Amino acid sequence: MKVYAEKLVETVVDKICDVCEESVMIELNGEKHEESGELSATFGYGSQEDGNVYHLDLCEECFKTAIYALRDKRRATLMFDEEKDLPDEKFGLDPKRSAI
C-alpha cells in the first residue's frame, strides 16, 4: 500500500555573489544555470584562525579577481627564486578536469 502526503521542499532559485552581490545564475536557452566559484577554508588547532570556517560564493568575475590576486602574490614570493617557474594565466586551473 502506498501512502501519499504533500511535502514542502526548499529549492535553490538563485545564488548571490558574496562580493558584488550579483546573481551567479545565467540564462541559456531559456534555462537558468549556476556559474560560480567558491573560496573556502577550515582552520584547526595551531592556526591563528583556529576554529574558524570561511566560505564565499563568487561570480565568475569576482572569482577571477581572487585568482589573479593570489597568482600575483605567488609571483611576488617567487620573483627572485630562479629554481621555480612563475605562475602563468593557467594558475590554479585543474588540467585533468578543464577543457584546455
Image (spheres, rainbow, N blue to C red):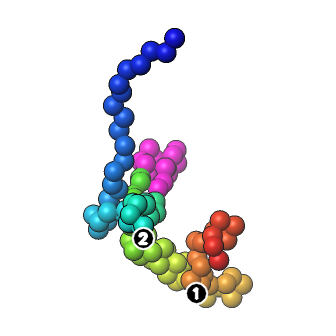
Residue at the outermost right position: 83
Against 21, is 82 above or below?
below
Q: Does 46 appear in magenta?
A: yes
Q: Is mark 1 on a helix, strand or loop?
A: loop
Residue 31 vs residue 56, the one in the foreground: 31
Which of the pair 12/79 is nearer the observer?
12
* 3D distance between C-alphas at marks 1 and 2: 28 Å
Q: What element carries label 2?
A: helix
Q: Can residue 79 be seen in this view?
A: yes
Q: Position of residue 81 (x, y in %)?
A: 65, 85
Q: In the visual, does 16 lie left or right of 40?
A: left
Name the residue located 37 percent from the left edge and 20 percent from the top edge: 5
Main SS, magenta region, reads: loop
Specify the farthest residue to the top: 1
Q: Provide the residue span drawn in magenta.
A: 40-53
Q: Where is residue 89 in the image (x, y as percent from the top left)?
A: 56, 83
Determine the residue positioned at 69% across, 67% down. 96
- Quarter of the image where one finds residue 19: bottom left
Q: Mark 2 points at which residue?
A: 60
- All told, the count of numbered labels is 2
Q: Mark 1 points at which residue?
A: 79
Nearer to me, 19 or 5: 5
